[in-house]
Image (cartoon, rainbow, N blue to C red):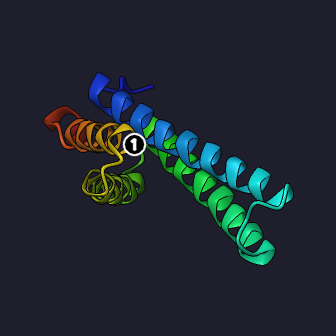
Amino acid sequence: MQQRPPSLLGAAGVQAADAVIVLAASVLAGIDTAVGQSYQKGSGIALTLIGLGTAAALAWVALGLYRARRWSRTPAALTQLFVGIVGIYLVQGHRYAWGIPSLVLACAGLALLLTPASLRAM
């Protein structure tokens, strides 16, 4: 088996962290829907299902990065760009507790993904 560089493993870890965060938010949305705190029950269910599917897709990409699969590079980069954009909006909305960690996670994910060692491995 080919040795994977630490930067690629780190990028897989960041991607997995993104998946866990989306999973946690989806579970919370599902709980809110179940106890009647969602604006509309149908939209709460849909949001929960979309979130669970997204978490599964992000985890699949993390596994692809861990295995150094070429197909995983683009979705991982797009994920980090999206997380960064969301982080900017959160900071602009004075949600620093969520925005700053999102920005740090996105920057770390992109940096680890785009290191020369990661690019060579994929």
Task: Report whether 8 appears left or right of 43.
Answer: left
User: Which residue is the site of mark 1?
Assistant: 98
Q: Quadrant of residue 48?
A: bottom right
Q: Residue at x 85, y 57 (%)?
A: 34
Q: Position of residue 27 (x, y in %)?
A: 71, 48
The secondary element bearing badge 1 is classed as helix
Q: Quadrant of residue 46?
A: bottom right
Task: Report whether 109 appears left or right of 58.
Answer: left
Q: Residue at x 38, y 28 (%)?
A: 9
The amino acid at mark 1 is Trp
Q: Position of residue 69 (x, y in %)?
A: 42, 47
Q: Check the image and report above or below for 88 versus 64.
A: below
Viewer-proximal residue, 68 or 58?
58
Q: Position of residue 14 (x, y in %)?
A: 40, 36
Query: For the C terminus, which image quadrant?
Result: top left
Q: Residue at x 40, y 42 (%)?
A: 98
Q: Check the image and report above or below for 5 versus 51.
A: above
Q: Position of residue 1 (x, y in %)?
A: 45, 25
Judge the density around disc 1: few (<14), some (14-19), many (≥20) Cα neighbours within 10 Å: few
Q: Residue at x 49, y 50 (%)?
A: 61
